[in-house]
Image (tube, rainbow, N blue to C red):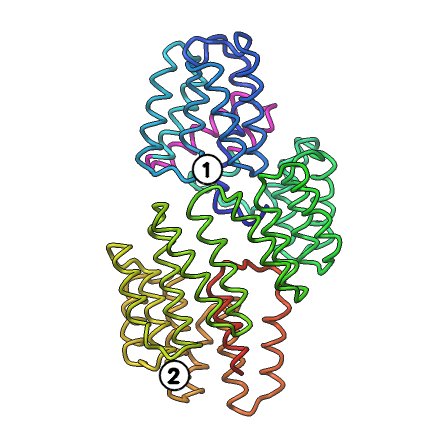
Amino acid sequence: MNRLTTLLVTCSLALALAPISSQSQDYGGGRSPAESEAAQQHFWAGIDDYLNFFPSSGARHFEMALEADPGFGLAKVLHAWQVPGLPAEERQAGIAEGIAMMGYASSADLILAAAVKDMQGGNAANGSRAFAALSEMYPDDPRLAMYSTLFRGARGDNTDNAVAMANLKTRFPDFAPTYNLLAYNLWNRGNRVGAMEAVRSYVELAPDHPNSHDSYAELLQWDGQYGAALHQYARAAELDAEYDGAYVGAAEVYWLMGKDDEAVAQLEIAIEHAVTPAVGVNYRRSIGNIYLMRGDLDEGMEHLQAAADFGQVEGAAPAAAFAYEQMAVADAMLGDGNNVDAHLAQAAELRGDEPAIHQLMVAIARAESGDVDGARAMARELMKNNEGGFFENFGHGVMALADIGEENYEGAMRHLALADPSNPVTQAALAVCFAEMGMDAEADSKWVELENNRQINLANAFLAMAFIEKVQH
């Protein structure tokens, strides 16, 4: 599942556990897995779900393992570190509590728990080295090998991802999760044949896990095989109705097919199964984006407001703030701009500060509402404070939007040459510049590039902005 790649590091903890705990006689506060069969079964089921990017189900299994055996310290450590939506302080407290329960655990289990504590506490280098050492202690364990590989960068190992996964596949040909990650890495490097072979192997090795079908569906989606993709997404939902990624993926396919109503219906189901309030906010924003991308400001703003309201009630302040920031941009692009400042003020109040993402959205709203000087000033500050990263790159895009607002298309082109060519805002701005400069063929090519991108995320505010721009041109 590619939509959860930001959870890759946190979800991979479970890779390391099977052989260590099975060889320990006293793990979990002195309790052997054999003392509670139910706890043991849920423990391994939780590991399997985390390995296969289904964190909410994994968390439920660890919770049930702890219900069956309240002294299961290693399960407590895993749950605290990986349950979706838990604040960082509570994760650290839960990990510490789990470690305190492991007074009679093996040295290997204690090293593992300490490594988790290091990772959560911000000492990734030490944690990575500990995972590598554990893998060396148990060289025949594919889970440990995968775990050591995933965290290799923290200890200075910069092996290419596709190469690393291919090496693991060679060592452990029957280990399903490797094929999942290998498929995405091969696709991203242009090897579509190899990616499809890998993801089909993943389905064959893990036929009863929803993520294997979701991953296959996503690659089919990217390949333009929409009917086959919908079939695989449906199979994922059939295997576990709580697997929200299946509904989100189906929504993407329906939107790509031009079936907006079906896309909205799938997102409404996803909302019912959202793993955290912040995710629920994003799904509601996704519905709003569908309407905004076809130029329906009223319906789009209604859903963005619903997203913001939900986030505020449920304690997801940053997600709610972003909904308000997106409302400001939408009002600037499709409305009269009278509520831009009010939306931005609400966002700032929810955030309590002005992180880079807030500054970026403010700059875009300023540019789109005609305040080009304000947009440039904010963009300069953003670029100065975030050198060499995403926000500096996007700052050039904002500068281009300001130039476009003054009909300085050549100046805009100079900034766009320094912006990310894969960013949909960059693509839309280039299309506008080409059209205004009389380069119709080039403009059409950029719009086609934007429309033909099947690797989408309906919650992506920048995708929505690009399609709003297209509607207006």
Residue 127 vs 109, above or below: the answer is below
User: Left or right: 465 with respect to 266?
Assistant: left
Q: Position of residue 356 (x, y in %)?
A: 32, 60
Badge 1: how crowded within 10 Å, few (<14), some, or many (20+)? some
Residue, x 58% and y 19% (percent of image)?
41
Instruction: Give the secondary structure at mark 1.
Output: helix
The answer to which of 436 and 65 lies nearer the viewer is 65
Residue, x 30% and y 35% (percent of image)?
89
Determine which quarter of the picture holds residue 360. bottom left
Amino acid on which the number 1 mark rests in the picture:
Thr
User: Left or right: 315 with respect to 438?
Assistant: left
Instruction: Give the secondary structure at mark 2.
Output: helix
Amino acid on which the number 2 mark rests in the picture:
Asp
Q: Position of residue 344 (x, y in %)?
A: 30, 66
Q: Quadrant of the N terminus?
A: top right
Q: Is residue 126 magenta?
A: yes
Q: Which mark is residue 397?
A: none
Q: Quadrant of the C terminus?
A: bottom right
The answer to which of 63 and 123 lies nearer the viewer is 63
Q: Position of residue 348 (x, y in %)?
A: 27, 60
Residue that mark 2 sits on: 403
Determine which quarter of the picture holds residue 276. top left
Q: Position of residue 5 (x, y in %)?
A: 52, 46
Residue, x 68% and y 64% (percent of image)?
257
Q: Which residues are the magenta region?
A: 121-147
Which comes sooner in the sequence, label 2 or label 1? 1
Badge 2: how crowded within 10 Å, few (<14), some, or many (20+)? many
The answer to which of 111 and 55 lies nearer the viewer is 55
Q: Are marks 2 and 1 in contact (CB under 8 Å)?
A: no
State the predominant SS element of the stretch in magenta. helix
Q: Which mark is residue 10?
A: 1
